[in-house]
Amino acid sequence: MENKKDPQYNERYKAAKAQVRADAKQKVKDIKNFFIHLIVFIAVVVTVVPFNAFYTPANYWFYFPFLIWGIIVVNQGLITFTNGGLFGKAWEERKIKKFMEK
């Protein structure tokens, strides 16, 4: 067992605690950015759809940009709320373990 009076132990503890805090701050920032992006997306959709319907009712062009932008918003949500998305840190760790077993 490590001695808590050991200066190296204290430095490692402080560094680990600082890293946990930095990771938590980054996660909060990512969540905040996702919701800002989602709100902007919704606001633009609510604005552009009636504009398109009023000025060019024969041609509904708003589907294409919103489909692509919607995919981007969903991807950002997956990355934010599922530990890095489909190819995040958990996936990397699984692949590293798999290749190390060979």
Image (tube, rainbow, N blue to C red):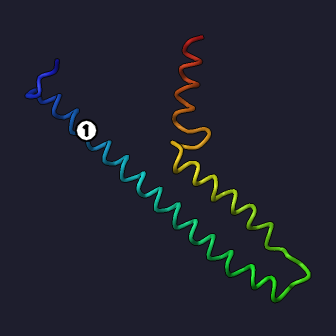
Q: Number of callouts in the render?
A: 1
Q: Is residue 22 left or right of residue 90?
A: left
Q: Is residue 89 above or below residue 56?
A: above
* Amino acid on which disc 1 is placed: Ala
Q: Nearer the viewer, residue 50 or 17?
A: 50
Determine crowd level at label 1: few under 14, some 14-19, many 20+ residues with C-alpha closer than 10 A. Answer: few
Q: Nearer the viewer, residue 83 or 10?
A: 83
Q: Is residue 50 above or below residue 90?
A: below
Q: Position of residue 82 (x, y in %)?
A: 53, 44
Residue at x 60%, y 10% (from the top left corner): 102
Q: Position of residue 53 (x, y in %)?
A: 81, 83
Residue at x 62%, y 40% (from the top left corner): 86
Residue marked by disc 1: 15
SS of the residue under disc 1: helix
Q: Is residue 10 left or right of residue 88?
A: left
Q: Is residue 72 left or right of residue 83?
A: right
Residue furthest right as drawn:
58
Q: Position of residue 67 (x, y in %)?
A: 75, 62
Residue furthest left as drawn:
5
Q: Is residue 9 above or below residue 40?
A: above
Residue at x 58%, y 25% (from the top left corner): 95
Residue at x 55%, y 25% (from the top left corner): 94
